[in-house]
C-alpha cells in the first residue's frame, strides 16, 4: 500500500502520522503546497504561492496539475488534510474515485466543527472522515458521508523528551497562542496580573511569533502550560507540552472528556479551567506547586498511550484497510 498525505502539515500532525506509517512498513509520502508557520517537515514541497488568493491560481495550477499527474497512478490511498486536496475546488476527487483510489479526509477542527453541511458536501466522495476528538465529532455536520472516525492527533515522542521542572519560589506559567481570541489570551493575562497584584508568586511567559525551536525551549522551562480557554478541547500545544512532562491547564467539554476516557481507558491528566475560573485555578496551583511534577509525569504517560505516532498510525492503517484493502 502506498499513501499520500497532502497538502498541509498542520502543526506537524500529518507528518507524524506519515512517519508512523513508514515505521510500520507502509510507503507514505507527505506533499505540501508550501511550508507555513507552525508546520514542520515534508517529503515534497510544491512551493506554491498563497493559495487563498485567486490571483495566484494561474501560477499555481500548472504545478498542482503536474503533482496530480505524478501522484494519481503512484498512490493507493489519498489522505487529505483540513478539507484541501491537490487541485482547487477538489476537482480531483471524481477522477480518484474512478481510479478506485482510497480517499480519506482528516479534519483539524475549524474546517469542520460547527460548519453547515452545505460547506462540506465534498465529504460524500470520501471513504472515511477522521476527526481528532469526540467534541469535533459531536459538533461536525451530518450528511451523506461516512460516520466520523475519532483518531487523536499524533506526535513523534522521540522529538519531545520529558523536561520536568521542580517549581521554585515562583510558579512559571507558559502560554503560546496562535490566535489570541481563540485561545482566551486576554483572560490569561488578566488572571496572572490579578494574582501578581495580590502578591502571588507567579510569572507568565507569553510565547508569540518566535521560531519553533525557541518556543520548545520556553515550554520546557515552564512549570505549567495554559492551552486554550474557549474551544472545549486540547490541541497540539497541549500535546507537545504533555510530552515534555508539563501539567496543562485547558478548557474541556466534559461530555467529550468522558467519552475519551472511556474509549482509551485512561484518565485525562489535564487541569480544567475556563476564562472565569482561571485565576482561582492558577492560585490553587501556586499553593500546590510541589505536586506538579507528578502530574507532569502522568501527562507524559497519557501522551505515550494516546498520541504516540505509531499508535495513531495503526488506527489510521485500519481505516485505510477498510477503504482500500491491501489485497486490492
Image (cartoon, grey):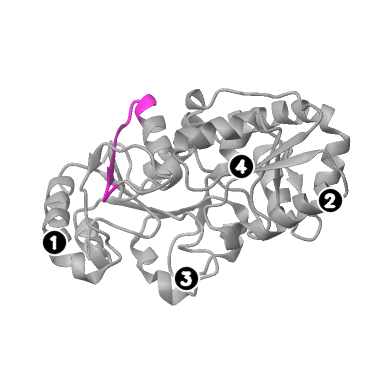
**Whether label 4 touches label 3, CB < 8 Å:** no
Residue at the (59%, 65%) spot, across then down: 139
Q: Which residues are magenta?
A: 22-34
Residue 252 visible in image: no
What secondary structure is marked by label 1? Answer: helix
Disc 2: which residue: 197
Disc 4: which residue: 238
What is the C-alpha distance between the residues marked 4 and 1?
38 Å
Q: Earlier in the sequence, mark 4 or mark 3?
A: 3
What secondary structure is marked by label 3? Answer: loop
What secondary structure is marked by label 2? Answer: helix
For the C terminus, the quadrant is top left
Categorize mark 4 by other alpha carbons within 10 Å: few (<14), some (14-19), many (20+): many
Q: Measuring from the top left, give residue 6's x and y in whole percent.
A: 31, 48
Q: Measuring from the top left, give residue 283's x and y in whole percent.
A: 85, 45
Categorize mark 3 by other alpha carbons within 10 Å: few (<14), some (14-19), many (20+): some
50 with respect to 120 (left or right): left
117 with respect to 276 (left or right): left
The dot on residue 59 is: 1
Residue mark closest to the camera, 1 vs 3 = 1
**Whether label 2 touches label 4, CB < 8 Å:** no
Residue at the (38%, 43%) spot, across then down: 320
Look at the image and say whether residue 29 sits in the magenta stretch: yes
What is the C-alpha distance between the residues marked 3 and 2?
52 Å
Disc 3: which residue: 143
Amino acid at each position: 500500500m502506498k499513501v499520500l498525505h497532502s497538502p498541509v502539515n498542520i502543526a506537524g500532525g500529518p507528518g507524524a502520522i506519515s512517519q508512523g506509517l513508514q515505521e510500520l512498513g507502509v510507503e507514505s509520502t507527505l506533499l505540501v503546497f508550501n511550508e507555513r508557520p507552525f508546520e514542520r517537515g515534508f517529503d515534497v514541497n510544491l512551493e506554491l504561492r498563497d493559495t487563498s488568493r485567486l490571483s495566484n491560481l494561474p501560477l499555481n495550477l500548472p504545478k498542482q496539475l503536474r503533482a496530480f499527474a505524478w501522484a494519481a497512478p503512484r498512490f493507493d490511498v489519498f489522505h487529505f488534510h483540513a478539507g484541501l486536496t491537490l487541485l482547487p475546488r477538489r476537482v480531483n476527487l471524481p477522477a480518484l474515485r474512478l481510479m478506485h483510489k482510497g480517499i480519506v479526509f482528516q479534519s483539524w477542527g475549524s474546517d469542520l466543527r460547527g460548519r453547515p453541511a452545505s460547506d462540506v458536501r465534498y465529504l460524500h466522495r470520501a471513504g472515511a472522515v477522521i476527526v481528532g476528538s469526540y467534541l469535533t465529532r459531536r459538533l461536525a455536520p451530518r450528511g451523506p458521508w461516512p460516520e466520523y472516525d475519532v483518531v487523536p492527533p499524533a506526535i513523534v515522542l522521540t522529538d519531545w523528551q520529558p523536561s520536568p521542572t521542580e517549581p521554585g519560589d515562583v510558579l512559571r506559567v507558559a502560554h503560546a497562542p496562535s490566535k489570541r481570541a481563540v485561545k482566551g489570551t486576554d483572560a490569561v493575562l488578566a488572571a496572572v496580573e490579578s494574582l501578581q497584584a495580590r502578591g502571588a508568586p507567579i510569572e507568565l511567559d507569553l510565547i508569540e511569533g518566535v521560531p519553533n525551536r525557541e518556543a520548545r525551549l520556553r515550554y520546557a522551562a515552564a512549570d505549567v502550560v495554559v492551552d486554550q480557554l474557549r474551544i472545549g478541547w486540547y490541541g497540539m500545544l497541549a500535546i507537545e507540552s504533555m510530552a515534555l512532562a508539563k501539567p496543562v491547564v485547558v478548557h474541556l467539554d466534559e461530555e467529550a472528556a468522558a467519552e475519551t476516557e472511556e474509549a482509551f481507558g485512561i484518565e485525562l491528566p489535564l487541569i480544567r479551567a475556563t476564562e472565569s475560573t482561571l485565576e482561582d485555578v492558577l492560585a490553587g496551583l501556586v499553593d500546590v506547586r510541589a505536586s506538579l511534577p507528578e502530574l507532569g509525569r502522568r501527562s507524559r504517560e497519557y501522551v505515550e498511550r494516546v498520541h504516540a505516532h505509531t499508535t495513531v498510525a495503526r488506527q489510521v492503517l485500519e481505516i485505510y484497510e477498510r477503504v482500500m484493502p491491501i489485497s486490492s
